[in-house]
Amino acid sequence: MSLSFAPPPPSPAAEALRAEVRDFLKREMPDLGPRDRLDPWSNWDESFSRKLAAQGWIGMTWPKQYGGHERSAFERYVVIEELLAAGAPVGAHWIADRQSGPSLIRFGTEAQRQAILPRIAAGECYFCIGMSEPDSGSDLAAARTRATAVQGGYLVNGTKVWTSGAHRANFMILFCKTDAKSDDRHAGASQFLVDMQTPGIEVRPIIDMKGGHHFNEVVFKDVLLPEEALLGKLGDGWRQVTGELAYERSGPERFLSSFALLVELVRAIGPDPSDRAAEAIGRLSAHILTLRRLSRSIAGMLEAGQDPAIEAAVVKDMGNVLEQEIPEIARLVIAAEPDLGSAEGYAAVLAQTVMSAPSFSLRGGTREILRGMIARGLGLR
Amino acid sequence: MSETSDLLRATAERLFADHLHKETHEAAEAGTWPAALWAAVEESGLAGAMTPEAAGGAGLEASDALVVLNVAGHARLPLPLAETMIAGHLLGRAGLKVAAGPLTIAPAAGGAFAARRQGAGWWIEGEAARVPWARHAAGLVLLADSPDGPVLALVNPDQVSLRPGTNLASEPRDTITIAATLDAGVVAPSPVDAAGLRRLGAAMRTAQIAGAVRFLLDLTIDYVNTRVQFGKPIGRFQAIQHMLAVMAEHSAAAEAALGLAADGLDAGRPVLVAAAKARAGEAAGQAAAIAHQAHGAIGFTREYDLHRASRRLWAWRDEFGNEAEWQRVVGRAAVAAGADDLWTFLTAA
């Protein structure tokens, strides 16, 4: 079985929007150094999120009745790739815009949609994702956090971990077990829309090796969720989670995480490159061009109502390889001792990239999980 | 790509399935011209896909025509279909009559020709190495420098002397030498310069590489699903699964490169063709290595079909410019755009 990537259809409307986004960035892009432009969807800046919302660039594809703008997937694609390439701090609203909002549209009740979506689209409501647990990483089906039906709702107990932004998010979409007896590992799980202010939720910081605070441990101790917190159907959690994978894995954020370093590498090389430097930049550029074509192809397939989950895994895995190659290649083309505190842009962004790179092929599905999925998609069992 | 390309893909697949057999491959590898296969291809009109309509071709854009070469690469087609397509395309654009039969182009690699007016006609001389399929060509399209700028000349096989050679896949790559007088009617200002000819060749090889990589992927999937070791198909081992996943990624990248090459030709954006050949060349080497590793010793034999794709990939990745050559083209263009316009360069390129 071969994978299928339809050529990305032309979208003049999206291209027209590109100039608008670039103009906006010239005016409104915060003055960030190169190291702070790296991996932009990890950078939390609520005021910038509100500015984007004012442009109509959050919830772009959603129905107008929920505060959306009914733009095409390609228009959204252009906006997010321009923001990422510029290193704009899009972290605050990223999860809500990319997957929580679409999940609410797909599975939420009318009341949930009306309560939440307009706030996301206004750039003032942020989400985190409660999936991984101490004993359940890649093996999501092994999750042990449990919601038990009680009078007036569900009682949740358990621990989520590696939850990015939980200390700042307004809501979590929680994946947990709701049926203790099911033999099927994939049955008996559900999703909940959890207000992070609910009593009994404790968010504990996990400091990463750079000294940054993105991750958290989130402990649920007898947390009572109202019945209306259920997202989608009881017991359908696994299907709901896996149905979103193509959206989560195929976007430009899966191959542009190190782009800020490539920009500084080009700056350091200057206008008269050695053959070796030209080959390095040419190779990385050729990889970006092909990945971008594949990624846009998937955007087209999603717009056409297909579910290219395997193709998305291909883009993410190849994109992560590229993101991790960029620092390894850069440091040998332009030598510099990586230094987070350096006033020199290149040494600082190199340091930031080297220490961020391991996460690229872990978050959102590890390399090993993706390659297993691809192999199954090819017909290997 | 379009309905036209879907139709072309189906036509080419059926044609090669009907007329290209194991014996055809073996005879071609032994040096025999597959005359019946060529006759079927010529009859189909596919060879004139990129020849302008005014010159009797289909006049298709590269985005449609390259699909035919993609299928040809998958079929390991032992014919100068790419070269005939380029030759017809150039002759037609130059306003010259497009000769019937298999055609080739030179120089494809090293070498050069010089031409000057002589009486009512032209004098042309020079030598080119590694000219694809020269010994079987009914006409050779030579790109020559002249005092009037680059010219295109259609010469007959009996006007050149030829030293045979082959590429790794046993495809003819001959050295030709010419010192001859030509009629004015077979020489015209060239629509491309040497770099343009090299780009056309690079785009064609990109399409063929993508097809051959896809063939290797198909073949290797079948093999690992049927070959049993330690009591189960080896495709059940995670080590094998992950190799195949990486191969599928290179296949996807090569197909995307084909799309870039077609866009680059159709929209006149040379850097896309350069990026395409650079990326496809990388996929060629990686996919061939994985296919051989997954197959073990059987893949190393003349009997088994793997080598017909892997040997072509090892040859094609170095023809019309290897990865490093094209990476330099892309890289120099990128640094010329500069750090602050790198993204603009990549999205407009």
Image (cartoon, rainbow, N blue to C red):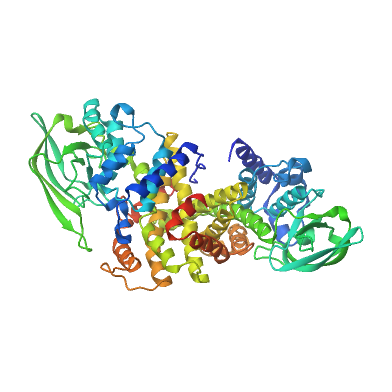
Evaluate whether residue B261 shows in this view: yes
In the displayed orientation, state which residue is furthest to the front.
A27
B49 displayed left or right of A376? right
Number of numbered discs on residues: 0
A91 displayed left or right of B134? left
Q: Nearer the viewer, residue A271 or B196?
A: A271
Q: Nearer the viewer, residue A326 or B303?
A: A326
Residue lying at 44% horizontally and 44% vertically, measured from the top left: A19
* Residue A151 image position (x, y, % from top left): 8, 29
A161 displayed left or right of B125? left
* Residue B337 image position (x, y, % from top left): 49, 59
Evaluate whether residue A306 shows in this view: no
In the displayed orientation, state which residue is furthest to the right.
B119
Q: Quadrant of residue A106?
A: top left
Q: Nearer the viewer, residue A348 or A358?
A: A348
* Residue B154 image position (x, y, % from top left): 81, 56
Give the answer, above or below, for where A182 lies relative to A356.
Answer: above
* Residue B132 image position (x, y, % from top left): 72, 61
Give the answer, above or below, for where A226 lies relative to B91.
Answer: above
Residue lying at 24% horizontally and 45% vertically, measured from the top left: A47
B161 displayed left or right of A21? right
Give the answer, above or below, for where B21 lies relative to B301.
Answer: above
